[in-house]
Image (tube, grey):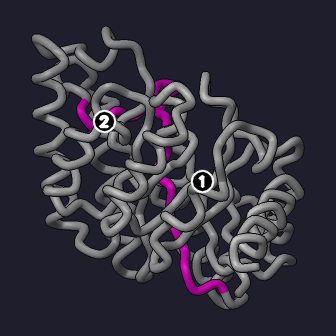
Amino acid sequence: MPLQLGLKAGVDDRQIADRLQYHPDVFEFHLVEQNVTPEGLKVLRDKIQYVRQHGVTQIVLHHPMNWQNRHLELSMSEVASPERYRFLWQSTLDLLELAQAESVQLLVHGSYDDPIEELTAGYAHLWEASQVLFKRMDYLQKIGGHNIVFENSISPLFYYGNPNLDQAIFAKNYRLAFDISHCFIKLHGDNQALMQSLKTLGPHVHHYHIVDSMGGSHDGLPLGTGKINWAGVLPLLNPAASQIYEVQLKDQNDAQEMIASHAYLQQIADSLKA
């Protein structure tokens, strides 16, 4: 049985045309701050509808990672970063409204891999920032319903792979996005721990980022060029979830590394069924 083909692009017409030639099942828009201005949101709506008209039934909007070259930490203190904080919330609420109107998914990062001093700016300690983060995720889950998913990183605030934290996240009933390489990196290349996390969180995962890694840093490798045990991982993926290949491209207008990764994973899937 063919695996889902999921591809990622910006709103650039050349990138979209390149991805659509492969007839993907899933399309993820990687957004930047310019895409969430009033005009940018109008363009984005048009692109969503254009992609849907070309047969794509599952569409994900990846919330902008940065504002003025600084990460948009969901836990950030309003006092410490008032303008960035306002942008975070305005963009999140505007994109969530669009996602609900267009019946697509909004992906929000629980955290990024910023230094501790950045994560704790405006807070007494990391625990306080963590409490704020989970309260905000609770709120977004409440208002986002079936149109929001939260992605893990290698940040100490929101990551997968720690059995106790995985159980706590599972108990929250969040709709999750699981970036496999982020978990693998956080676990320093431990495939067994990665697979346990996939198994634990699987029922609540609604979207996967499929990407290989050597397990040391954020390297975004095509499948088969890193150390992730894909034959062990593949059977643990939630079959009801969507997925995209989030690998680094040599040319953003050419998805060849994504397509090669898909072919590799399909080969793994075929071999498991043989």
- Name the quarter where the C terminus is drawn: bottom right
| In magenta stretch: residue 67 | yes
Q: Position of residue 50 (x, y in %)?
A: 67, 82
Q: Secondary structure at mark 1?
A: strand
Q: Which residue is mark 1?
A: 30
Tell me the distance, in whole angstroms, between the alpha carbons under discs 1 and 2.
Answer: 28 Å
| Image position of 97 (left or right of 19) | left
Tell me which amino acid carries mark 1.
Answer: His
Q: Position of residue 29 (x, y in %)?
A: 60, 61
Eye-nearest disc, 1 or 2: 2
| In magenta stretch: residue 121 | no
Range drawn in magenta? 56-75
| Image position of 123 (left or right of 273) | left
Q: Position of residue 78 (x, y in %)?
A: 19, 28
Tag 1 near tag 2, CB within 8 Å: no
Q: Secondary structure at mark 2?
A: loop
Q: Nearer the viewer, residue 141 or 102?
A: 141
